[in-house]
Image (cartoon, rainbow, N blue to C red):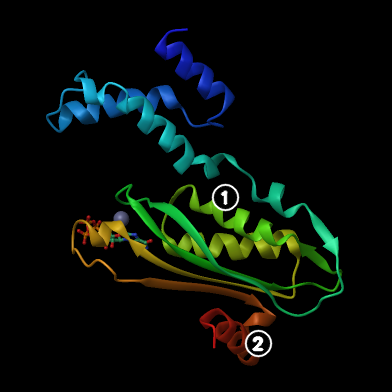
């Protein structure tokens, strides 16, 4: 199988909606544009590698959060469930460079007791992180998906990130952190919100 056929095969099999062949061609163009020779030894495989990497970075565009939140259990628990310090990488939609940090995802199950598997909260973060993003939208999308699919009494998402577009270029402020939150339902009540925040902050 030649290289393009192999890529098309990979595309069909694994990249789940991301057009690897098209990315490969675009990366060759970028290499020309920066003054490189895409046909030199060290770069020969680079367009293919980048295409594969982009297939991972943007896989979430072709995934449905409902697929992950479909698994629920009837567990009697009507208080906060919080998974904190979920590490993730996403891609800034303005510069296509990474931003990364941690997400804290919590909810209070609804009266019908829809409790999901803990790992599904981390999977939910991945579905939305693996897209071209801004941090505010990522935060809102996670909380909205929880509200829609689990019908909880309340939900809360707090995200802390460093944006490479602010660290390695532009204003160049490595270490600067951006914190965003989105809170819905009962978690908006001051006492409940304060409890969740103190758990997130580890106090
Ligand atoms: N609100 C928000 N802004 C972001 C996010 N990621 C990157 N940005 C900002 O997007 C802005 C884009 O600004 P522009 O002036 O259009 O682009 P730019 O000339 O590359 O900006 P500089 O980064 O200031 O050099 C910058 O201020 C970035 O810091 C994000 O997740 N949320
Ligand atoms: Zn950026």
Q: Is residue 61 left or right of residue 149?
A: left
Q: Secondary structure at mark 2?
A: helix
**Residue 110 lies in what quarter of the image?**
bottom right
Check the image and name the residue furthest to the top.
1
Q: Give above or below for 41 relative to 160.
A: above
Residue position marked by numbered label 1 in the rendering: 127
Q: Give above or below for 72 relative to 110.
A: above
Check the image and name the residue furthest to the front.
42
Whole-angstrom CA distance, mark 1 to mark 2, is 27 Å
Q: Give above or below for 66 relative to 152.
A: above
Counting residues from the start of the chain, the first of labels 1 and 2 encountered is 1
Q: Look at 80% across and 78% down and name the residue there.
A: 78
Q: Is residue 116 left or right of residue 112?
A: left
Q: Secondary structure at mark 1?
A: helix
The residue nearer to you, when weighing 155 against 105, is: 105
Q: Is mark 2 within 8 Å of ligand 1?
A: no
Q: Give above or below for 149 relative to 54.
A: below
**Residue 198 lies in what quarter of the image?**
bottom right
Q: Residues within 10 Å of mark 1 (few under 14, many from 20)?
A: many
Q: Look at 39% across and 24% down and name the residue there.
A: 22
Q: Is residue 36 left or right of residue 110?
A: left
Residue position marked by numbered label 2 in the rendering: 192
Q: Is residue 119 left or right of residue 38?
A: right
> x and y percent of residue 153 in the render?
74, 75
* Quadrant housing the C terminus: bottom right
How many discs appear? 2
Q: Look at 45% across and 65% down and name the residue there.
A: 136
> x and y percent of residue 104 in the render?
56, 70
Q: Look at 75% across and 63% down and name the residue there.
A: 150
Q: Residues within 10 Å of mark 2 (few under 14, many from 20)?
A: some
> x and y percent of residue 116 in the render?
75, 61
Q: Quadrant of ligand 1?
A: bottom left
């Amino acid at each position: 199988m030649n290289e393009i056929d192999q890529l098309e095969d990979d595309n069909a099999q694994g990249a789940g909606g991301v057009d690897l062949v098209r990315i490969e061609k675009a990366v060759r163009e970028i290499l020309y544009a920066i003054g490189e020779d895409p046909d030199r030894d060290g770069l020969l495989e680079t367009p293919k590698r980048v295409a594969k990497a982009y297939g991972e970075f943007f896989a979430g565009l072709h995934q449905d959060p409902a697929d992950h939140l479909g698994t629920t259990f009837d567990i009697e628990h009507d208080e906060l469930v919080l998974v904190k310090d979920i590490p993730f990488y996403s891609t800034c939609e303005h510069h296509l460079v990474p931003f990364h940090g941690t997400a804290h995802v919590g909810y209070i199950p609804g009266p019908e007791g829809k409790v999901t598997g803990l790992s599904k909260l981390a999977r939910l973060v991945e579905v939305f992180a693996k897209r071209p993003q801004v941090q505010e939208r990522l935060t809102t999308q996670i909380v909205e998906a929880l509200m829609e699919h689990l019908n909880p009494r309340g939900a809360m998402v707090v995200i802390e990130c460093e944006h490479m577009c602010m660290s390695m270029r532009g204003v160049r402020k490595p270490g600067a952190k951006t914190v965003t939150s989105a809170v819905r339902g009962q978690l908006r009540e001051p006492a409940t919100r304060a409890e969740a925040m103190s758990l997130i902050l580890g106090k």
